[in-house]
Image: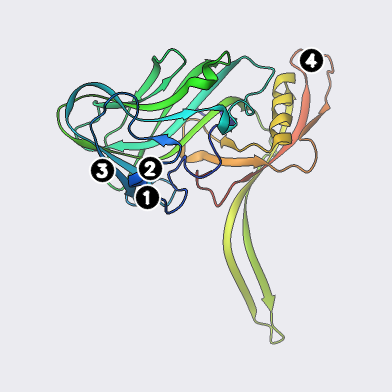
Amino acid sequence: MPGDFTLGCLLGQYNRWQSFDGSSVAISTGVESWDVIGPGTAALNGRAADVNAVHSSDQSLRYNVASYGGDRSAFWRLYTPTDDVHARIFPDVTTHDLIADIWCRATAGSGLQSNWAFQGATGTSVVSRAIPVGSLPTVDPIRMTQQWYSDGQTNNLRLLVNVKDASSGFSIDVDDVLLRVDPITLLPEFDFLERSRLLAARHRTQGGMLHTYQWTRHFAWQVPLRFLSNSHANLINWWWVNGFALTLTLDTSDAGTIYNVRIVNETQPVGSKIKPYAYALGGWAGVLELESLDQGSLVF
């Protein structure tokens, strides 16, 4: 629902390439775990790093598509067990929800010629969203949701760009790609806290002068929860034990409230029962302590 507070587990390698910001590797020769040729014979003219059309990282990926007829996949990412996809799927659940948030843009006039899509085990694109038309320096967010069954599709989950009947050549820019599994909606108590922590050192001289050395900051949240179901309590504790990277959304109707975080509790986040103990949904309570992975970007 719009305005919900959600938390979900990120899929993909923890190597900064979901934002194409891994290192100084030449994107023109490869994009690590992303295949920019894709299945079929897409007419790809080349790819390069772009520092203009970015969202929250230092560089984005721009790839150029020539004009041609037909329907081809020009760009895709296969999520495999080597990415710890299996490890991040809660073992007690067989049906999973997927949410993808992607910041991208197409060159003017080509907005209906290309789209992002999920592809499951059958090779069929089961849900897709058109890439918005933008102008430098902006990339716009799109969101896709899909149910997913862990019966073998795990080995064949693709997030891809399809290009159809391009009457003229165009370019597509993409920056942050967040694919998360099993997101849950949380209802924090009134003493929820959002804080920004500053990494700094202060020194006062004998003469009374105060010197401050400031480096960066990160974000932190304290999230008191009550009446959690058994499944949500187990899922949160399982994420904490494994130290998974998560995506926190403070308002699902606002793409500007998304953060990549980890649970940093020193002890188990959810572990106390509250009355009535026979509460049908579980009646668990606890306090989540979350911190952003960096200064607030979506790179992980």
Where does the image place residue 199, in percent across and percent down from the top left? 63, 61
Image marks 1 and 2: residues in contact by CB distance under 8 Å:
yes
Residue at 56% x, 26% y is: 181
Q: Depth-wise, is mark 3 or mark 4 nearer the camera? A: 3
Distance from Cα at disc 1 to Cα at disc 4: 56 Å
Locate the C terminus by quadrant.
Answer: top right
Q: Is residue 120 left or right of residue 209?
A: left
Q: Amino acid at mark 3?
A: Ser
In the rendered structure, find residue 213 and report the number of the disc placed on it.
none
Q: Residues within 10 Å of mark 3 (few under 14, many from 20)?
A: few
Distance from Cα at disc 1 to Cα at disc 2: 7 Å
Q: Is residue 244 left or right of residue 65?
A: right
Query: Eyeballing the image, is 111 above or below 45?
Result: above
Q: Is residue 110 left or right of residue 183?
A: left
In front: 26, or 65?
A: 26
Q: Depth-wise, is mark 1 or mark 4 nearer the camera? A: 1
Residue marked by disc 3: 135
Decide which of tag 1 and tag 4 comes sooner along the chain. Answer: 1
Distance from Cα at disc 2 to Cα at disc 3: 25 Å
Asked which quadrant contains residue 91, the reply is top right
Residue at 69% x, 26% y is: 235
Q: Amino acid at mark 2?
A: Gly
Image marks 2 and 3: residues in contact by CB distance under 8 Å:
no
Decide which of tag 3 and tag 4 comes sooner along the chain. Answer: 3
In the rendered structure, find residue 30 and report the number of the disc placed on it.
2
Residue marked by disc 4: 279
Query: Eyeballing the image, is 202 above or below 54?
Result: below
Residue marked by disc 1: 26
Decide which of tag 1 and tag 3 comes sooner along the chain. Answer: 1
Distance from Cα at disc 4 to Cα at disc 2: 53 Å
The local secondary structure at tag 1 comes to loop
Where does the image place residue 216, in percent across and percent down from the top left? 57, 60
